[in-house]
Amino acid sequence: MSYQPASYILTAGAASLGLFFMTRSIQSQGKRHPSEHVVSSPLKSLAALPAEELRKLPYPPDLFPGARDVDTPYGSIRVYEWGPERGRKVLLVHGISTPCMSLGIVAENLVQSGCRVMMFDLFGRGYSDNPSDVPHDTRLYTTQILLALASSPLAWSGTNAFSIVGYSLGGGISTSFTSAFPTLVASLVIIAPSGILREHHIAWQSKILFSTEGFLPESLIHWLVKRRMAEGPPTPDKKHDSSATDAVKAETGNAHANPLKKADAPLFPHLPTVTIGGAVQWQIQNHAGFLPAFISAIRHAPITAQHPYWRKIGERLTAQKVNSADAQAMNNGLWRSKVLMILGSTDPIIIKQETEEDAEACLGKGNVETVVIEAGHEVPMSKAKEVTKAILRFWGEDAEAVDLAPEPEVETGT
């Protein structure tokens, strides 16, 4: 009888140990390697296409010089880098729906002015893979920037290492990045930037659709978003609230306008099949990671409520002006102690007056220089020359002395 308690203990212990190992076995079987969550871009599937067919794509893989595919734990990143090796280094970050080609004309113009430029496709866009298990938030995009920079054969690190130009979502990403790494960035230029968009402009349908993570099946959300992306542009209305898919139409030049006159306009005169609208539709049809990346970005990316990051930059700029003899304050500041913000006068997404007011409130009076160009949200494509000249003037360079690339036949937004 004295051995019974011991036998009970041994039996219970053995059962617990068995249950533990069985649970661990089940968990290990269900646990997936991070690489299994990576959704590949269409790049590999294009290998079988003849060169003639590749050239007809709306976004050919050799569209820009200096292409490289960077292997990372988050999947492959498509990066382009070209221009004089000793030139001013400029990183360009594109918007939510297009590949980096939306900043291609501006990039080429900057190269013509003597700059060394780098562009990359955000995760899930163009020829970059999508890490589907990771939220597309500031942390992911900051990491992606650092991975792209580290892949260069040239040094893109150190004090005032490079200037950064961000468009739309890329503007919000670039601002957040600059707030975290102030000594890296010599100059911050934001074009129709996200980040401080007033939330009351977000349509209630979008709030419901993109706030239902875990409630509606993701497959249904993907179907609804894909369908809305294929719809025509909204009717012009001053009271119109922006839906998430309006951002797609605005980036392609489709918001409140005739889509055929804008989204299908060739981006480069010598490449008639290369169009922004065509590239977005090509992603929808051919990049399995695009819709999940777009939806995740709407939920998590720096689109609204980024005011603390902007204020942080403003505080540093003010300190830079007050303590111009302080080396640390100068290193934490920016070129000319200002941010350059370029806006489209008729942009239906990033409203000119509101953005000017909110940017000045966050960055501080005198810490932001705003240039308004007669265009819509597609301003870096439809008015690439004016955008480039504004950037060069801000940097104190002779904008008129540069032979800039011709602009596409794209009407401005209305």
Image (cartoon, helix red, strand yellow):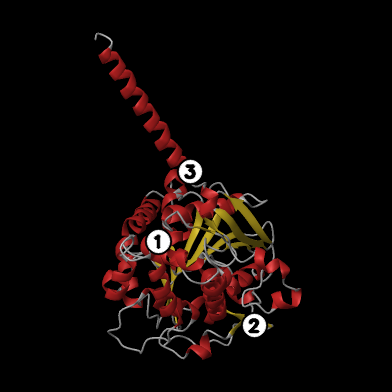
Q: Closest to the observer: 315 or 220?
A: 220
Task: Give the left or right position of residue 195, taking residue 189 as reference.
Answer: left
Q: Which residue is mark 3?
A: 29
Q: Nearer the viewer, residue 318 or 374?
A: 374
Q: Secondary structure at mark 2?
A: strand
User: Which sits earlier in the primary sequence, circle 1 or circle 3?
Assistant: 3
Q: Is residue 198 visible?
A: no
- Mark 3, Cα crowd under 10 Å, few <14 / some 14-19 / many 20+, is few
Nearer the observer, 48 or 334: 48
Nearer the camera: disc 2 or disc 3: 3
Q: Nearer the viewer, residue 123 or 186?
A: 123
Going 25% across and 8% down the picture, which residue do you hit? 2
Q: Amino acid at mark 2?
A: Thr
* Residue projecting furthest to the top: 2
- Using the rendered image of the protein, determine whether residue 252 is visible from the camera's viewpoint: yes
Q: Give x and y (percent) for residue 189.
A: 48, 65
Task: Determine the secondary structure under disc 1.
Answer: loop
Distance (Cα) linking label 2 and label 1: 31 Å
Q: Quadrant of the C terminus?
A: bottom left
Establish if 136 lies above or below 383.
Answer: above
Residue 247: image location, x then y, percent: 42, 75
SS class of the residue under badge 3?
Answer: helix
Is disc 1 surrounded by few (<14), some (14 to 19) or many (20+) residues within 10 Å? many
Residue flagged by tag 3: what amino acid is it?
Answer: Gln
The CA distance from mark 1 to mark 3 is 32 Å
- What whole-number distance in Å separates the C-alpha atoms at marks 2 and 3? 47 Å
- Counting from the top left corner in percent of width and height, residue 411 is at 51, 88
Q: Please name the amino acid that badge 1 sits on.
A: Ala
What residue is shown with label 2?
A: 273
Q: Badge 1 is on which residue?
A: 301
